Image (cartoon, grey):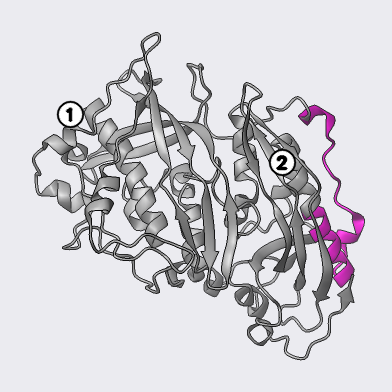
Amino acid sequence: MRTGGSKAPSGAVVVGAVSMLLLSSCTGGEATEENVESSDTAAGVNGESDAPDSAEDGETLAQFCASDPKVTESDRARVMDVGPLPGESPEQVPMPYQQQLEQDSDFQPASEDGPAEGVPVPEFSALLCDEHADNDARSAALSQWFEFYYYGELTGDEELAAQLFPTECSECLESLDEIRSLDEGDMWIDSEPMTGLLHMWQMGEDPETRIGFVKTQLPGYTIYGPEGEVDSGGEGSYTRGFEFEYSQEVGHWQLVHVREASMGDDVFADSGSGQGSSEAADVDAPELPAEAEEKTAEGALAALDHWFETFDYVARTGDSGPMEAMHNPHNDRLSHFYDSFTQQYADGGYIELRGESHIQDVEVYVDEVTNDDAALVYGDVSEADWDTYDATGELVAEEEGQEALSVIHAMIYDEDLGHWQLAEYHPGELDEARGDLGLTGAEPDLTR
């Protein structure tokens, strides 16, 4: 789950097809059937709408376990017996899948020229099927989580990793947002896999429960789209508590909770925004300008300007509240903008911005947009670079923002709230999308 740690791009995630929202008849920010189904029908990065089979014969993890597989030596190689004991070193989470990829002659890794090809499905571990395997099974499930996630990044298919979650684990499902955004945006990522260090299996509130205290390490990455590079970033890390249980319903172990954690703590708290920087208390939350409440081109632009103010604010404080108020609730993908920041503060670290975010060379369209409650704001977006510090105050990453990235923003006016919100965000040139948006020949209602 690179988001919230994060390898997901802070500003360049394609979160939906702008034309769907602007050409629909929804009002007040309500989702239409067409909007809701868009994520299910979007083509994958390999040009297929259906997810690849979970094994060569289409076998799912549940079907694999129902076949009563035998535990092998390769299964036992996944087992980690970490403490907690004083001075005990963390253990690298095994990923046999990396060797599987190296030995597969059909596999071609991703590059700037295109997504990965010939991607094999990770081999399933029989330990996941054993109800009584306890920490051995938890180790295998943790190992497979990292493997299944990397498979999702390589293919744009989230279904394999989703088999490890019960449907009620919302934070688990949210961890697949990055894979989903790659799929929906016809993008691909060129990167080594994220890896984990298991520090301990710690007892949970239930004595029968064990929580894996894991530091996830994120390598550098580049995200590409059909037109070239979309985003890139450096190395980073974050800490999580992974809780696994055996599910009688599906017949194998699953990840049931992903919890915030901090090094040295004996308590795992549920997910939430943190405020770890000493500078946080000195920063006032930006106030929504009155102009953003006007259903005009000026109002839509004022709301978007405020959006960028809240982006910088959450980076400086870890408080995502003002930014959440400015994005349409029917597009939860927009949390990608601030997940990495809030997580850094939750882990006890903080962010230092080296500038401010803004939009320039703006064109705003209102009258020609089919939806009476929508506006389109196009311009060149610049985001500040930033430095990431951990809980000890050590600089762990130097990140580059964006400079003059052409972006189409879809704004929706929420009648209940009485102001504009950002609904969708699509990097790209407006001239290339005018036909799809119904703006052929249209003049902007406002420029800046």
In the orientation shown, which residue stands out farthest toward the top?
86
Mark 2 packing: few (<14 Cα in 10 Å), some, or many (20+)? many
Q: Quadrant of the C terminus?
A: bottom right
Task: State the image coordinates of residue 412 (x, y, percent, origin top left).
Answer: 73, 67
- Callout 1 amino acid: His
Give the residues drawn in magenta, as a range: 280-307
Query: In which quarter of the view is residue 41 placed?
Result: bottom left
Which one is nearer the viewer's eye here, 169 or 162? 162
Can you tell which mark lies on residue 315?
2
Helix, strand, or loop for circle 1?
A: loop
Mark 1 packing: few (<14 Cα in 10 Å), some, or many (20+)? few
Q: Relative to 418, does residue 261 appear above or below in the rendering?
A: above
Query: In which quarter of the view is residue 198 placed?
Result: top left
Q: Relative to 79, does residue 392 appear above or below in the rendering?
A: above
Mark positioned earlier in the residue sequence (1 or 2): 1
Q: Relative to 117, does residue 95 appear above or below in the rendering?
A: above
Query: In which quarter of the view is residue 141 placed?
Result: top left
The residue that disc 1 covers is: 132
**302 magenta-colored:** yes
Which residue does the image show at 22% across and 39% down from the upper left? 128
Task: State the image coordinates of residue 249 (x, y, percent, origin top left).
Answer: 24, 44
Helix, strand, or loop for circle 2?
A: helix
Which one is nearer the viewer's eye here, 307 or 37? 307
Task: State the image coordinates of residue 387 (x, y, percent, origin top left).
Answer: 69, 38
**127 magenta-colored:** no
- Callout 2 amino acid: Ala
Q: Residue 279 vs residue 69: left or right?
A: right
Q: Residue 248 vs residue 86: left or right?
A: left
| Pair 1/2: label in front | 2
